[in-house]
Image (cartoon, rainbow, N blue to C red):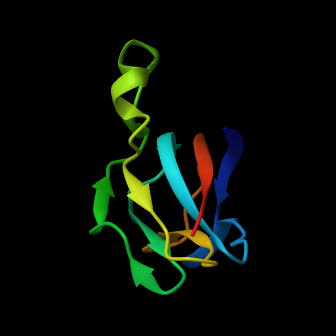
Amino acid sequence: MYFSKIVATGAGDTTLIAGVAGQRIKIISYTYATATTVSVKFLSGSTDLTGSMALAANTSAYFGSGDRLPSTLLGCLKCAEGEDFKINLSGIAVVGGHLTYTLEAV
């Protein structure tokens, strides 16, 4: 299992985890917060993995927690083989958080 930070400040795509040839990135859990109103979505390369998730200023979103960890090991998002895991912001905002992921051999 691996851990990574979520840091995005500009409108458009930001790569959070670089893709690895012959592997798929599987997101186990995430949490993020924003100081301003913004819509967020996650992508595998250029393909949307989620719809646009609108957040009001000073709010947060998450998937997975310590009390549910065994059931969340199935993951909530999965990238295509070798593709980057990205976050997309609808506008300029400060979005920060962290995520847990695994790499699956294809």
Residue at 59% across, 46% down: 101
Residue at 32% across, 66% down: 50
Quarter placement of the C terminus: bottom right
Image location (x, y in percent) of residue 85:
58, 68
Image location (x, y in percent) of residue 49:
36, 70
- Residue farthest to the top, as pictured: 67
Image location (x, y in percent) of residue 35:
51, 46
Between 7 and 98, the residue placed more toward the observer is 98
Q: Is residue 70 visible?
A: yes
Above or below residue 74? Residue 87 is below
Above or below residue 71? Residue 31 is below
Residue at 51% across, 55% down: 26
Between 32 and 47, the residue placed more toward the observer is 47
Image location (x, y in percent) of residue 86:
57, 70
Residue at 38% across, 41% down: 74
Q: Is residue 96 visible?
A: no
Q: Say left or right for 67 vs 88.
A: left
- Residue farthest to the front, as pictured: 106
Q: Say left or right for 38 vs 23.
A: left
Quarter placement of the N terminus: top right
User: Splitting the image into 4 quarters, where does residue 53 fall?
Assistant: bottom left
